[in-house]
Image: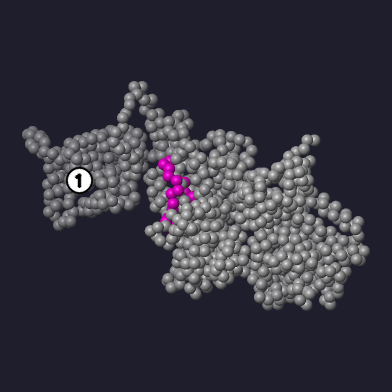
Amino acid sequence: MDDSGLGAAGVQLLTAQGERVEHPDFSLSLTNDECRGLLRDMTLVRRLDAEATALQRQGELGLWASCLGQEAAQVGSARAMAASDYAFPTYREHGVAWVRGVPPLDMLAMLRGVTNGGWDPNRYRCAPSTIVIGNQVLHAVGYAMGIQLDGSQDATVGYFGDGATAQGDVNEAFVFAAVFNAPVVFLCQNNQWAISQPADRQTRTPLFERAAGFGFPGIRVDGNDVLAVMAVTRYALERARAGDGPTLIEAYTYRMAAHTTSDDPTRYREAAELEAWRQRDPIERLSIHLMAEGIVDDVFLEGLEQEAEELGELIRAGVRSMPDPEPRAMFDHVYAERHPEIDAQRDELDTYLASFVEEGVR
Amino acid sequence: MPDQVQVFSLPDVGEGLTEGEILVWHVKVGDVVTVNQPLVEIETAKAAVELPCPYAGIVTELHAQPGEVVPVGAPMVSITGASSVHQRESVLVGYGVKHGGEPRRRARRTTAAPRAKPIVRKLAKDLGVDLAELTGTGHDGIVTRKDVLGAIVGPAPARESFDVIATGQPIIVRGVQRAMAEAMVLSAFSAPHVTVWVDVDMRMTAGLVRRMRAHPAFTDLRPTALTIVSAAFVRVAREHPRINATWVDGPDGPVITEHAHVNLGLAADTDRGLLVPVVRDADRLSLVELARAQQAVIDMARAGLSTPADLTGSTVTLTNIGVFGVDGGTPIINPGESAILAMGRIIDKPWVVDGEVRVRPIMQLSLSFDHRVCDGAQGSRALASVAAFLADPAAELLLG
Amino acid sequence: MAGIDGNEPHQMTMAQALNLGLRRALERDSKTVLFGEDIGRLGGVFRVTDGLQKDFGEHRVIDAPLAESGIVGAAVGLAIRGYRPVLEMQFDGFVYPAFDQIVSQVAKLRRRTEGAIGMPITIRIPYGGGIGAVEHHSESPEAYFAHTPGLRVLSPSDPQAAFVTIQQAIASDDPVIYLEPKRRYWDKGSVDDSVDPLDLAATPDPWRARTLRAGSDVTVVCYGPMVRTCLEAARASSEVSIEVIDLQSLSPVDYDAIVASVERTARLVVVHEASRNAGLGAEIAARISERCFTVLEAPVMRVTGYDVPYPPNRLEEFFLPDLDRVLDGVDRVMSY
């Protein structure tokens, strides 16, 4: 019984059981190294995610928004991008940041509470996490408009979830992208839940069909099928580069964990639903397929597990030893140019802190 | 290396939580545990949460039992092991778990304190006193007005201390009373006051006032001697500009500003205390207009309706102390001005006229002036002019 | 004073007190509806609406799509139809998409229709910092709303006040921005729920300030999350006698209460988490300087957050006024 909700419209190249299938409109041909690379990416991202969740439970991070279950949607789409493309993530796209080259500890710095950003967006061509729902989708469109003005062949990918599609910003982004024919790929991970609200609280029509109303194509893809996601994203990026405008990709997937570590999904979700989606795990199915094709073996998998262990150790040690910033750092980069209030208040704080008898304010 | 004991304290797992209830332990004392192994399940205000173990080692002690509510930051379990890992303190601003007990303030080195209130600083500047050289006797070493004044009149002579037994209800000086007190001190101790006085025969003025009262132009007004004295003083202020001037300590040194107009301040005794409403441009008013304006501003002041604008801007002031039954005194100049005229009571006294003693209505005038602005000659001449006007007002009004 | 079961007043958290107050409001008026993200099935991310959808139904406690502007805009329409919407903005930093609907419509419709259409809308917003949160979860936007004519702004500081004022806010025919200090959600206090918040003779007027601690040397005015901080500071201050006033109503501000206090103490300190420039403290300082000029012994001091975006949470303890900073403000005002 296929209760995945995908329907006939969902593009799939790898079934939940790990069987490779063909699709009339989309195909993908990868080298063995590229295949192993996808498995490695998803495995390490999942490990990073698990370590971060544990660290939050140990009081080392303030919060964590898990991407468990969405590794294929994120890795598949991000691996389709060129180095000079630009990604605009939400706060859950750890797989995207990983692929774009953002160091793991940089991803965790914001949740550690030592910074509001964490990495240099222009270095990795990946915008900082955006917590206000939907804001970044407009940014993606604007960046794409800049690409057009430059006459470049670059493209952008704007990430958002099912919940965000109700926000004004996202709908305005669709309008602008259509009207300006902007080279942007809208990558919507429909993980079925916006905190406690199922996707049908945000829409009365399948999300991918909304694009038609705005004047551009929408495609639903099995979000847990990394091959299909990659194939469809490649197609959409080609369209953008060719000047054919935006595409909406609805990656149909599932948020396996809670909304964040502050959330308790047992209050609103059934265990049976979770179990059904466990059967559609993105990493499991790729592993089965690659094993069957002889592209990976036990040695490779053990090596990968070892690498994951080392990553875990790096993350634990790195987060625990992450230094707190100096108090006066809160005054840095508020403005580009000197500002009298900032200078005065920075001095005021310094003077105030120095007025205490004990050294070491903490 | 001796085994280190690591203590895992309850973290804030949900953005601002303060406590958690232990539901069930997944380990017991003596168990070997690995990193991230499920340790304990707790219940918070938001959710039931499983906590993974941060350390590898052996469980030596459980600090809380199922059913116990543990505050964030309190120890839950001790683990002995090889790894030494520092667990960071929760952020929890303001919850005070760190202190345990009533929050206290942290010790400071010094707190910067300005040395004097602005008005006291201005006084010091006006008097040429250097604040830095004074020892403040006020709260927290603040320099008070008394400290500043003490610096110019010299140290107080040693006197035996005496006990003052305060009786009665202390009156807190606020508002108008306070403003008056401060103005008096400022004026008295910045301008060197000289007072000159003269007696004048008011017979002609009294006669003029009687005729004015009968005249239709003054029907709704009640002219008095004050009206004529005002007219006289205003005229004299125009002709003797040094009594209608202001001494200013400018950035490049002192400056005397002689005013182009005469704004006559009239000291009035009201329910709120001493107020000085102002008749502006008094020198441009006819006698009728002056009488009307005077009555208006005094009535308003008595009714408590004067605006701040009505009570400021005088260039010279007149005060009638005669209504209290006295002749003369040493009035204190209104700060910002250089002269003040006090008129006393009009009382019959013996007066020599053409070699013979007659009974005449005599009034004393006292003029205090700022000796920085005008000298004895100028002040005396000005007063004599006022007296001459009052001795024969009709002639002055017609011919002046 | 009896509790629910006729016993002593209950000890409960502010979140629970708000929950109980909302329940009473739903019972009182069938036109009252709750509308917000995750408030129904989940019971709200802070559990303030816990259990209400189960008891009152999905047509009284409505889970909204993820769109703040949509929530407020739809509420305007509901109000015109005769409903009494009680909205939740999930966090302070998420109210901004709704700002247009609030200031352009909610604040103005009564005036524009010359009283024909009222906006009896309550917008509940958890606000303030001190919980170690990520960006946009620790804002203090009260000045924007206090500056907007047509809106009322309330912020309770303890569970009893929360229980009473949430009901009074909902019952008010004016739009009320109801700012809940999220770092105090878990503070416990005693709540007497037998009180009828709409009985003016029996309960305090929500638009009046409360003097929570008497003192003679200096007046400290505060609201919301800073009230507990200021009370702790007053207790820790042995040499200076500090009077603490909880404004509770940020628009209108009860200036008479502040003036009466300052006339006795002659010194005023205002404390708020929000940044200093053009914050509520600036307005209070200006007003008191007008009304108490001849009485004041010192300028009005403000103890506030700095004029920077809210910092990463490892720095928030330096940004937020704490006990030491409040007493530093008191020192400064006493030094005149």
Q: Chain of mark 1?
A: B
Q: Quadrant of the N terminus of chain A?
A: bottom right
Where is residue A229? Give x, y as percent. Answer: 79, 68
Residue that carries the numbered disc 1 in the rendered image: B226
> Going by the image, does A284 lie left or right of B235?
right
Q: Which residues are magenta?
A: C204-224
Name the residue rendered at 79%, 56% in the picture: A47
Q: Is residue C103 among the parts visible in the rendering?
A: no
Q: Tell me which amino acid carries mark 1.
A: Leu
SS at badge 1: helix
Where is residue A211? Give x, y as percent. Answer: 70, 75
Name the residue rendered at 45%, 66% in the picture: C173
Where is residue B171? Give x, y as percent. Answer: 31, 39
Which class describes the residues within 10 Å of circle 1: few (<14), some (14-19), or many (20+)?
Answer: some
Question: Residue furthest toward the right?
Answer: A294
> Going by the image, does A27 lie left or right of B92?
right
Above or below: residue C62 compared with residue C268: below
